[in-house]
Amino acid sequence: MAEDDVNQRFGLGNRETWWEDPPRGRHGGGPDKVRWPFLSIVFTLPYLIPVTKSLLARDPVTPWVVVMWVLVYGVAVSYALFPVAFERSRRFRFGYSAGMLVLGLAVVAATGASPFVLLYGTAALVFLLPLAWVVIFDGGALVLAAGVLLLDGRFADNYGDLITVGSVTMAMFFMSSLVRAVRRLQLANEEIATLAVTNERQRVARDLHDLLGHSLTTITVKAGLARRVLESSGDIPRAVQEIREVESLTRSALSDVRATVSEYREVSLSAELVGARAALRAAEIDADLPNAVDNVRPEFQNTFGYVLREAVTNVLRHSGAKQVKVNLGDTWLEIEDNGTATDVVAGNGLRGLGERLAAVGGTLRTSVRPGGGLLVRAEIPLPEPRAAAPAVRAEPAGGLA
């Protein structure tokens, strides 16, 4: 894996992430507030034991010695309060980090302790501050510590400890970067899961709308036709035939609902033409429909089937039309009616079709025809052909003619 890929993966190559606060997980972040104080005692004992012995050996006890005691144990107490800083504001975390470093530098300067004491502050703030500020704070603290050692004449004896502090801090820095990258990945996965659930809900809602809207409209039209036949002419055989078709539509709709929920349903343009012809005939609407769909590209027929279904449903429900005409092309579909519509009202059905076409790079246009009625046109452009690779002329080796 290339270095640029690693940097991008862990956010090290993105300048913006260097100035962002550490991401928090679903349950916040930081060590456990109950167990950490006990762990901090274990971590600070290697520092407290020798410094405490040194302070106990000082006699008499002067105010300056008391100040040194406060500084020494102030570092330990501040380190024990480390989990509290995770839950506070950015200003508090900056103040806490600066205070830890100042206490560590004060202990090094006042007590003559090893610069190892700085490690508690430098290691803690790599998890609290943006990465850029970590470099500024920790780098500045190490430079100041080196200055204190030089002024005190102890640099030659303690520069190894200072290098160790810098090395451990650098290791903690990269560990913090890894933790931040993992948390960003977790947050991204949670967002992807939420979007997936939302998209699935939208898919089911769109498919059920397209399916049930058409099926229930056709069933309503056919049931009304059967009622009118019985009321007007008493043609029982024809009424029975219409009721049988209603029963068949109901069974088909139930099967389609089950397939839609399980995402196994496929729409056939040819089948939708047959269904549209029957539904329009039952509504006593003159339908001019193609007899075949061979001229439509196979990969577009499923999408155009949804468009035809929704457009015919809208005609049956809202148009008041007496004539409907459907035209098909290899990459387009048009449905026009002579209804009473004088304006385009984008309902859930048209919005759903627009989303479905947009998913495959297509467009949906709806306009009002002169004299009333709607024209719905769906079009899916063909993908642009890839440019052919330029021909390479072979030359004889060695420049020979």
Image (cartoon, helix red, strand yellow):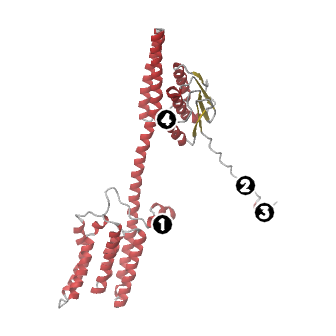
Residue type at mark 3 is Gly
Q: Earlier in the sequence, mark 3 or mark 4?
A: 4
Identify the residue under disc 3.
399
Name the residue located 47 percent from the left edge and 32 percent from the top edge: 210
- Real-space Cα separation, disc 3 to disc 1, in angstroms: 51 Å
Image quadrant occupied by the C terminus = bottom right
Identify the residue under disc 1.
15
Task: Between label 3 and label 1, give the one nearer the viewer.
Answer: 1
Residue 174, image x and y in percent? 40, 68
Residue 53, image x and y in percent? 20, 84
Residue 118, image x and y in percent? 32, 78
Q: Residues within 10 Å of mark 1 (few under 14, many from 20)?
A: few
* Farthest right residue in view: 401
Label 1 secondary element: helix
- Real-space Cα separation, disc 1 to disc 2, in angstroms: 43 Å
Residue type at mark 4 is Gly
Name the residue located 54 percent from the left edge and 22 percent from the top edge: 280
Q: Is residue 170 found left or right of 73 in the rendered image? A: right
Q: Earlier in the sequence, mark 2 or mark 4?
A: 4
- Real-space Cα separation, disc 3 to disc 4, in angstroms: 69 Å
Q: Earlier in the sequence, mark 2 or mark 3?
A: 2
- Real-space Cα separation, disc 2 to disc 4, in angstroms: 53 Å
The answer to whether the residue labelled 3 contacts the one labelled 4, judged by CB atoms less than 8 Å apart, is: no
Identify the residue under disc 4.
349
Q: Residue 194, relative to residue 218: is it above or below?
A: below
Locate residue 69: give its quadrant: bottom left
Identify the residue under disc 2.
392
Residue type at mark 1 is Arg
Name the disc covering residue 48, or none.
none
The answer to whether the residue labelled 2 contacts the one labelled 3, judged by CB atoms less than 8 Å apart, is: no
